[in-house]
Image (tube, rainbow, N blue to C red):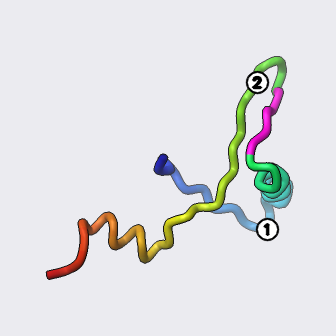
Amino acid sequence: MAAKKTVTLSEKDKEIIEFIDRIGAVGQVRVLIEGECFLVTVAKERVTDAGRNFLTRGGRDE
């Protein structure tokens, strides 16, 4: 599934980065927040920027 939004984190976001790293190590976790359960999945993107540009252009230039 394609991402709907890109969020850029900086070194100021250390706690969020550590949280994402912890989830990335196992792939998926359940997070309980005030009685609500959320399924959080972290996976590295598999398509490179060059590949994405190629795919969204529709193919090779003629």
Whether residue 57 sits left or right of residue 35 in the image: it is left
Residue corresponding to mark 2: 37
Residue corresponding to mark 1: 11
Depth check: give the residue in front, 7 or 22. Answer: 22
Rendered position, 20 above or below 40: below
Q: Amino acid at mark 1?
A: Glu
Rendered position, 36 above or below 7: above
Say which element carries label 1: helix
Q: Amino acid at mark 2?
A: Cys
Residue in the picture at 73% in, 66% down: 10
Whether residue 5 sits left or right of residue 30 in the image: it is left
Estimate the x, y position of residue 41 in percent, counting from the top left: 69, 44
Read off the magenta span. Answer: 28-32
Whether residue 49 sits left or right of residue 14 in the image: it is left
Depth check: give the residue in front, 37 or 25. Answer: 25
Quick check: is 30 in the magenta stretch?
yes
Residue in the picture at 81% in, 57% down: 21
Estimate the x, y position of residue 31 in percent, counting from the top left: 80, 33
Estimate the x, y position of residue 16 in percent, counting from the top left: 79, 53
Rendered position, 35 above or below 51: above
**Within-10-Å neighbours for mark 1: few <14, some 14–19, many 20+:** few
Between circles 2 and 1, the one closer to the viewer is: 2
Q: Main secondary structure of the magenta part?
A: strand
Q: CA distance from mark 2 to mark 1?
A: 28 Å
Say which element carries label 2: strand
As drawn, which residue projects farthest toward the left? 62
Residue in the picture at 69% in, 62% down: 9
Quick check: is 57 in the magenta stretch?
no
Residue in the picture at 33% in, 66% down: 55
Q: Earlier in the sequence, mark 2 or mark 1?
A: 1
Q: Specify the label residue 48 is tagged with.
A: none
**Within-10-Å neighbours for mark 2: few <14, some 14–19, many 20+:** few
